[in-house]
Image: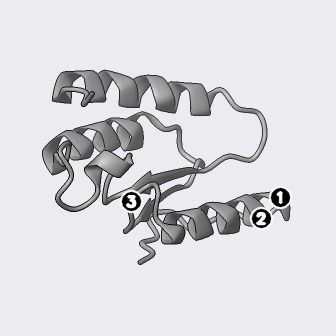
Amino acid sequence: MRVTADEGAELGRILATKVNGTTGPAAVLLPLRGCSKYEQAGGPYVDPEADAILFDAIRSTLRPGIPCREIDANLNDPAFADATAETFLELGAGRRPLPARSDA
């Protein structure tokens, strides 16, 4: 099931609000090529406009100081997994991940 644009906006605000409540190191990674296997190229739920609304809501709600990395990959792609692991290791080592970074 695909969320609507309105649902995505609300979901983005909810997710970012939850991240804002963290007291430890945090970062948000956005999979620019889709959030599920059904959003991969040619998939039945590809909706870049709805994804943009979701991601804009996340970006605009995150408090300053929480990095938001844009990853040019689908959530299920190896490139997204690599970026996630890299970000986790950076946070664990006390390094701040670069915001708005795009990985392919």
43 above or below 20? Answer: below
Q: Residues within 10 Å of mark 3 (few under 14, many from 20)?
A: many
**Type of the residue with mark 3:** Asn
Q: Which of marks 2 and 3 is nearer the N terminus?
A: 3
Q: Give me the C-alpha separation between circle 2 and circle 1.
A: 5 Å
Q: Circle 3 sits in a helix, a strand or a loop, which is it?
A: loop
Q: Mark 1 points at which residue?
A: 92
Residue found 25% across the figure and 44% down from its top: 51
Residue 9 pos. (x, y %) = 28, 28
Q: Circle 1 sits in a helix, a strand or a loop, which is it?
A: helix
Q: Name the residue under label 3.
A: 74
Residue found 18% across the figure and 50% down from its top: 48
Residue found 23% across the figure and 39% down from its top: 53
**Type of the residue with mark 1:** Gly
Asked if the residues shown at circle 3 and circle 1 are in contact, with their CB atoms under 8 angstroms apart, the answer is: no
Q: Give me the C-alpha separation between circle 3 and circle 1.
A: 24 Å
Q: Given this view, does label 2 or label 3 mark the residue nearer the observer? A: 3
**Type of the residue with mark 2:** Leu
